[in-house]
Amino acid sequence: MKKHGLRLGRLVPLAVILLCCSLFVSLVRYQVAISSKKQELANVQDQLNQQLAQNEELTRSLADGEDAIIERIAREQGYAKPNERVFVDISGK
């Protein structure tokens, strides 16, 4: 009878240690997963902010009207209005 109690006395602390180790490993896994998800969230928020800025720019372009859009595209391609002087910075700065 004493041997049975001795075995049980050794198994209980071992079981507690194994349980603690298992909980610790689970905690570490969850912390890694949380960190990964936070990074993913930050990336998605950056993409969202970029898209919102682009949408705002397009909305402003549409609000300017069709003529302003055409003029902006023409200026980007190097065109100018009649008798208009265009200065080009060649300093490279």
Image (spheres, helix red, strand yellow):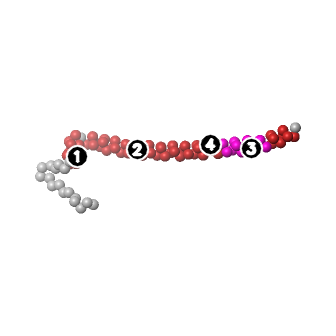
SS class of the residue under badge 1? helix
Is label 2 in a helix, a strand or a loop? helix
**Residue drawn at (22%, 46%), measured in percent from left and top?**
72
Q: Mark 4 points at which residue?
A: 26
Sort mark 2 into few (<14), some (14-19) or many (20+) by Cα contacts within 10 Å: few
- When asked about the image quadrant of residue 24, the answer is top right
Horizontal relation, residue 47 to residue 22: left or right? left
| Residue 91 highlighted magenta (yes or no) | no
Earlier-in-chain disc, 3 versus 4: 3
Q: Identify the residue under disc 1.
A: 72
Which SS class for mark 4? helix
Q: Distance between the residues labelled 3 and 2?
A: 50 Å
Compared across the picture, whether 48 is left or right of 39 comes to left
Q: What stretch is highlighted in magenta?
A: 10-22
Q: Nearer the viewer, mark 4 or mark 2?
A: 4
Q: Does label 4 or label 2 sit earlier along the sequence?
A: 4
Residue sitting nearer the eye, 89 or 4: 4
* Front residue of this view, candidates 46 and 13: 13
* Image quarter in which the N terminus is found: top right
Q: Which amino acid type is shown beneath numbered disc 2?
A: Gln
Circle 2 residue = 47
Contact (Cβ within 8 Å) of mark 1 with mark 3 = no
